Amino acid sequence: MSGLEGRVAIVTGGGTGIGKGIVRRLASARCRLLVSAANSMVGAEKLRDELRADGVEGEVCRADLRNPDAARSIIASAVETYGQLDILVNNAGFTLDEPFLDGTTERWQEIFNINLMSMITASQDAARHMIEQGSGRIINISSVHGIVHMPGHAIYAATKGGINGFTRSLAVELAPHQVTCNVIAPGAIQVDRYKAQNLEPRAVGAHIPMRRVGQPAEIAAAVAYLASDEASYVSGEILYVDGALTSRMAFST
């Protein structure tokens, strides 16, 4: 993808899973990177060292996104370190799988803060810098659960649906400033939590039209496209990277 070398990119939740794949993809395009993490700081620091060993400029910062204002410190850190901000990838998120009737207001607020409110505050501060620069890319990672629903995911789905609506509205508002805003909605992607939850990728893949789960690198490729010059006229879109899962009317084998 053209136009990425030397650009400054933030990836939230970049220490593990999809975030780590995104960081590696942008690093291969020679972006300068700031990776934020909370519980995965060890992974983020290892990734930073990996980037530096490859001659890529990379920094990490800790941000507990249960407090949405913590996201503002990520933007400030990138601008202070590099003097500019070109790409914001709001990837940090938390999956909640519990019966709706068992939930608590406190727990719901925590999930909304991590998945949605921190994304909004980061986007606000990033947009201010991007408008001043005359261009920018905001890429928000959502989920197929914004439109594909199942028991136990009511609150999680609400946050992802919120991401979709927020991003499309923001795209219209920022378009005159040449700042694009898009969503990537992953389907089933093989990440570390598969092992933690004893999920077998092959079994999960059997329920997907392509008969496999995706890989973090496939989400990262979509991010690289939306961040590139080739996508300068693409804004307000939701890109589903899900092996045709959302194109099917109902689950079948």
Image: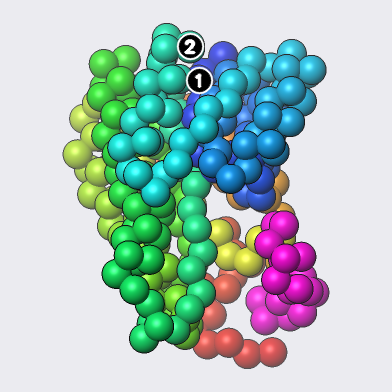
x 63%, y 66%: residue = 188
Q: Quadrant of residue 122?
A: top left
Which of disc 2 and disc 1 is earlier in sequence?
1
Left or right: where 133 falls relative to 224:
left
Q: Is residue 15 magenta?
A: no
Look at discs 1 and 2 and give the one toward the viewer. Answer: 2
x 32%, y 22%: residue = 130
Image spot of residue 125 (x, y percent): 29, 29
The reply to whether callout 1 and callout 2 are in contact (CB within 8 Å) is yes
Q: How is the image coloured?
A: rainbow
Q: Secondary structure at mark 1?
A: strand
x 59%, y 70%: residue = 244
Left or right: where 244 falls relative to 165:
right
Image spot of residue 101 (x, y percent): 36, 86
Name the amino acid type tagged 2. Answer: Tyr
Image spot of residue 94 (x, y percent): 50, 58
Q: Quadrant of the N terminus?
A: top right
The answer to whether residue 223 is visible is no
Closer to the camera in the image, 135 or 55 = 55
Q: Is residue 195 magenta?
A: yes
Q: Is residue 112 above or below residue 72?
A: below
Q: Which mark is residue 8?
A: 1
Q: Quadrant of residue 126?
A: top left
Name the amino acid type tagged 1. Answer: Val
Left or right: where 81 falls relative to 120:
right
Local crowd at mark 1 within 10 Å, few (<14), some, or many (≥20)? Answer: many
| The residue stretch that appears in magenta | 191-210
The residue indicated by pointer 2 is 82
Image spot of residue 132 (x, y percent): 26, 16
